[in-house]
Amino acid sequence: MIRVLLVDDEHLIRGAVAALLALEPDIDVVAQEADGPAALAAARALRPDVAVLDLEMPGMDGVALAEALAKELPETRTVIVTRHARPGVLRRALSVGVLGFVPKTAEAQSLADVVRQAHAGRRYVDPGLATEALLVGECPLTPRELDVLRASLAGAAVPAIARELHLSAGTVRNYLSSAMAKLDAGTRHEAARRAWELGWL
Amino acid sequence: MIRVLLVDDEHLIRGAVAALLALEPDIDVVAQEADGPAALAAARALRPDVAVLDLEMPGMDGVALAEALAKELPETRTVIVTRHARPGVLRRALSVGVLGFVPKTAEAQSLADVVRQAHAGRRYVDPGLATEALLVGECPLTPRELDVLRASLAGAAVPAIARELHLSAGTVRNYLSSAMAKLDAGTRHEAARRAWELGWL
DNA sequence: TCGGGCCCATGACAAATGTCATGGTCATCG
DNA sequence: CGATGACCATGACATTTGTCATGGGCCCGA
């Protein structure tokens, strides 16, 4: 029997996925949680075999939660389920030890398979996702460029970013400009959006 | 037995919700479709009692699909399930005859209840959602302002918008400016985002 | 040690952006 | 009828934004 912890902030979806997994004779959903801290607490208490995490959650990032789980409970395998799979996020997830990575557009029945693979210690990444991540390649942005893009994504104005990072306004514009060139975007907002979509922020 | 058609572009989630509804003895999921046209075809062929639609779908808008269903198959009741419930969208959905409106954060077990309510011809709207929609009130934007915001949301530049709407560039900037004032946003992008979040686009 | 890349900063300049004052049409209401 | 106000439209103006050229300091690898 594979004991599973399910984490998703959307109650209805969480319950639905639990129902789906409950159909499998060898899988037992032992807990459902809605956020990172609660999930950590439940994991400590129950020591599940596999944790199935939704990536999009308010508050704690799904990857950060996976990292915390890996650190505290190395014997618990992790599977991440996500809506829009951003290549950079996949990369980060794998680097913190996540074993399974499945988009919500995958076949319904595949989730149980991935859980079994993870339980056996085998990696499974959606093939389409993996090739996309390979195609995109490494992030070409410098640390400073990532800084200004992150601030820009939150909607901050140039002077505010400059103050926050202790830079001059011109310098901030420069980083934004070079980031825009690398992402071939016409505006800072577009650049920030693309960088986010690629999972680089 | 309530015969249900399930429409959601995310395969895994669709299967999970189907599993959830299948637990109910009086509900039978007779078909699952991934997009608007396929859903319409299935509905024509099977004449389900209730259609459960996800709002966020590529291509056809969930509300548009609900409207088409209501026109072609008035005896089929419609329930909409959504991630982020935008007030204006709720308004539009109700005006085209949607009976149920449930956010994905609702209790898992509530979906079956809403389906039963809809099947009986009764309306059910998530209470929190309804009050929010009331609080927000009517959209204060003029038709032209909505036009430019819509175009702006897609990322179009001012000259392009001007050509598309047969206006001068200055006029387009004007509409954007007044919309920004009404939504108290500092930039056109912020204004467009807020208008979208309120369901006005 | 000698590039080369990254980081920081500046000034100048063209283009895009947001604001304002203004005027036109049209329906409503006193 | 005349006044009012909403909507539509334009052009002028100052500010912001993105680009470019330039230069100095720093650290790492060849």
Image (spheres, coloured by chain):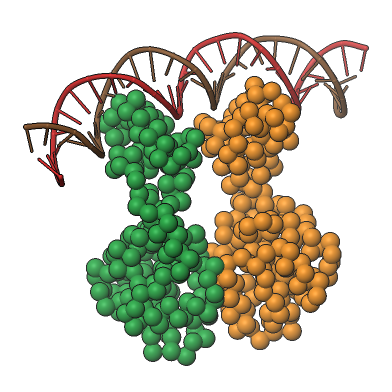
Chain colours: A green, B orange, C brown, D red
| Whether residue B104 is visible | yes
x%, y% of residue B163?
70, 30
x%, y% of residue A106?
52, 71
The image quarter containing residue A39 is bottom left
Closer-to-camera residue (A151/C8): C8
Up-down: is B28 above or below B176? below
Up-down: is A136 above or below A28? above
Q: Residue at x 26, y 78 (%)?
A: A75
Count every numbered label the image shows and give the total: 0
A150 lies left or right of B120:
left
Q: Residue at x 64, y 21 (%)?
A: B170
x%, y% of residue B169?
65, 24
The image quarter containing residue B201 is top right
B124 lies left or right of A23:
right
Up-down: is B6 above or below A136? below
| Whether residue A8 is visible | no
The quadrant of the image that shows the N terminus of chain A is bottom left
Up-down: is A28 above or below B129? below
Closer-to-camera residue (A184/D11): A184
x%, y% of residue A165?
29, 35
The image quarter containing residue A38 is bottom left
Q: Residue at x 64, y 50 (%)?
A: B87
Q: Residue at x 59, y 32 (%)?
A: B157
